[in-house]
Structure formats: structure tokens, C-alpha cells
Image (cartoon, helix red, strand yellow):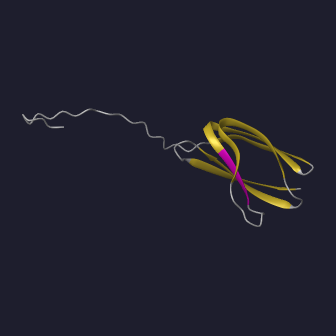
Amino acid sequence: LTDSFFSTSSKLETYKVDITDPVFTTLIYQLDGDKVHFNIETSEKTTIDYKDNSASNPKFKNLCRNKEMCEKTIRFTDGAHQLVMRAMDEAGNSVEETIEFII
């Protein structure tokens, strides 16, 4: 910013930029008939989604939002399943792990 006497003044601003990917610290799943119980923990608050690559039209579905710990039970059809588990933080950094199981 310059005034009429050509004096320049600038305000110093500091920003914190998150470039660190989250980490799955726990990724446990247990089969119970046609249900799968997930117990997932991450290194920071994340949104956790899963995609079943064995489905006819695989797409990510939400499991938990804005949490470090997620416990959820999901029902699956009979057969083999390959899931991509994705955790994404608020800055858009993400990590993926693949798990497989048979119902």
C-alpha cells in the first residue's frame, strides 16, 4: 500500500499449510455373516470413505466424517469384495489402503 507521500506499508500475514497425508493407525475389520464391522483410527481428523471394486459400478461411499476414530458396521452381498479405504483430511490430503474379504 502506497500513500500520497510514496510511503509503503505492508501487513505481514502468516499461513499454515497442511501438506501432510493422514495415516491409518488402526484398520481392523471383522466378518459377521453378511456384515463387516470396521474399527478405523487415523493420525488426524479425516473423512473416511470406501469403494467396493467388486461392485458393478464402484464409487466411494462415506463411512465417517471429520473423526479420528470410526466404528461402523456395513452389510455386503455374498461373494468376494475388494475395498479401497480412503481417509482425507480437511486440506484434501489423503491416504488409501486396500482390503479384501469373502462373504
Residues rendered magenta in the picture: 48-52
For the view shown, which residue lies furthest in the bottom direction?
Answer: 56
Q: Quadrant of the N terminus?
A: top left
Q: Residue 35's x, y, as percent?
A: 87, 48
Instruction: Judge from the rendering whether residue 80 lies leftward or rightward of residue 98; answer left or right.
Output: right
The quadrant where residue 15 appears: top left
Q: Residue 91's x, y, as percent?
A: 51, 44
Instruction: Judge from the rendering whether residue 86 lies leftward or rightward of residue 17; answer left or right.
Output: right
Q: Residue 102's x, y, as percent?
A: 87, 57
For the view shown, which residue lies furthest in the front direction?
Answer: 4
Instruction: Judge from the rendering whether residue 36 lies leftward or rightward of residue 27; answer left or right.
Output: right
Q: Residue 97's x, y, as percent?
A: 68, 51
Instruction: Judge from the rendering whether residue 101 lies leftward or rightward of residue 6; answer left or right.
Output: right
Q: Main secondary structure of the magenta part?
A: strand
* Residue 15 located within the stretch drawn in magenta: no
The quadrant where residue 72 appears: top right
State the count of labels: 0
Q: Quadrant of the C terminus?
A: bottom right
User: What residue is at 48 percent from the left and 41 percent from the top?
Assistant: 18
Q: Is residue 52 above or below residue 21?
A: below
For the view shown, which residue lies furthest in the right direction?
Answer: 33
User: What residue is at 58 percent from the left and 48 percent from the top?
Assistant: 94
